[in-house]
Image: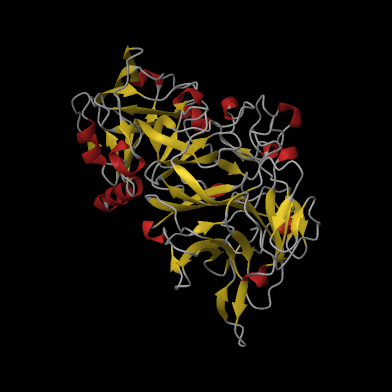
Amino acid sequence: MKHTIRTAMSALLCLAAVAGVRADDFAALRAEAAGRTVRLAPGTQLEALVVSDYRSQNMELNPNVSWDKVDLGENLRTAYVESPDGRYGFRLRFAGIYENRLERGDRVRLDLGGCSLTGETDPERYTVDGLCTANVEVLERGVALPAKERRIADLKDEDLYTYVTLAGTEFLSKQGCYANVFESCVQRSRLNAFDQPSRRTDGWASLLKDADNGSIYMLVNTKCAWRRDGRGVPHGVGAVSGVLVHTPMRRYGGDMGRYAIRPLDERDIAIPRDTASSYVVVAEWNWDRNYDGAIRFEKQGYTPRSPKSGVAGDRVLPDAGEGFLSTTSGARMRLDTEYDTRYAQDGDGKAMRVNAALRLDSDTRDWFRFDNRGRMSGAEAIVVETSTEGVEGRGLSFDFSFLAGNYDINRSWGYPVEWKVEYSVDGLPFIDAGRIFVLRPVVYNDAVIKDLGLRRLSYDAALGFTEYSVPLPVSLLGHKRLTVRLTPASAVMATIPENPADDSAGGVVTADFRQPFVLRLGRVAVRALR
């Protein structure tokens, strides 16, 4: 009986005692906790360099704990340390928000006895829980951190929770600020205090590209006052430094890649403001800073203040380069506002008055094809057509940002959730780019839905447009016709669950399903890597 109880307790706690190890032995602790949680024995000490700062509002994603509340303490409790040589890193989670007083550049000795160390997999990373101020001895302050420059493609799991510098990076979208969000639903700060935001959400991202066609998300919490200062993001190519993390974000679609980077503040972003890029535009549709609300169609021509009913059956001409953008769904296209631009201070900051998105209005069913038995036989698409004849480079990328809905709960469900990118040259069969992109609805107000009752803001509702960049093969260069399709990847349909914490992808589109669907494209581009 005693053996049974001990076994059950062991299985429940998943804890094992680890004898004391010598100071700064990150490797030994990693080996002990690989894939499990261990309780660290008295005498376990670790010498480390602090790469975080307790004063930064950008150390960790603050999670929703209810439909209307975010746990801001998660950021305050979190710190990161790395080994003296910068090879390995640990995340530290303190027991309380006032226990963490670590500053970047502190050399510390940590007494880890009684704390737990958890090793997670895919990617491999390690977290110490249960620290208090008494566990920390500051040996020295202001120590220079080891230089650790990486290309995005060279990042490895052992770099997680260390301070890295990504060289040769640039922002995918060079209009807007570091976190383009709908201010009314984020955390209150001096940026939006006059609007009395609901403070229901937190955390957003901007996508960085490098000179090797790599991409990585830069994560920014909405309490960071530096995220928007009216100047917009820098337009050049340079270095971005920060703590390397792995942080899935539901509101952004969930998958943020294997690695993401968290700058402590704007000083970690050393990208020049002068315009430069490792890419050249082949064709681009970008309605930011569109002062007259104009859109150029192939047949209808230049249409300032395009009709609110939209235009169907035409192709949109690009703002740069040569090509066409259209849809086979029959959706009506027009310009409409971006929802991630409210209360910005000027054009480069994505002020609502000078920025727009392409809005496509249709019925959800119009994006699918069904046979005479009601079985799904295919899907419609957004179609981008261009030519790469005479274009030289080391590769191509297809870049886009999208968002569903229009701040109305009745337009925030019933649409296809999973999308994919396909490409073809000169009429050959389409090839799947091999990735799923999750479409989210813009945040909305709580409301009663007919036959469903009151629905609250879902944990999956987005703060703004989600950005993506899809590398395309270099073999696509030099062709008369390149076609790229953005199309539903499945019939999985968005719902608004009764419990806001539940997954919103809870339905399936059928042949007889009818629901208005608003799709917004913030930016679409085909670019060649120089």
Q: Residue at x 39, y 35 (%)?
A: 168
- The front one of 281 and 66 is 281
The quarter of the picture where residue 83 lies is top left
Is 34 situated left or right of 292 in this image?
left
Specify whether 440 is left or right of 122.
right
Does the image show residue 307? yes
- In the rendered image, which quarter is residue 497 located in? bottom right
Residue at position x 71%, y 27% from top?
193
Residue 488: x and y, percent? Answer: 56, 66
Looking at the rendered structure, the number of numbered marks drawn on it comes to 0
Residue 378 position (above or below residue 481): below
Q: Residue 70 versus residue 211: which sits nearer the camera?
A: 211
Left or right: where 260 falls relative to 407: left
Residue 72 picture location, percent across and down: 56, 32
Q: Quadrant of the C terminus?
A: top left
In the rendering, at what x and y percent does residue 447 appear? 76, 52
**Quarter-of-image position of residue 244:** top left
Residue at horizontal 43%, vertical 36%? Answer: 169
278 versus 521 height, above or below: above
Q: Residue at x 21, y 40 (%)?
A: 31
Q: 467 or 98, which lies in front?
A: 467
**For residue 406, above or below residue 111:** below
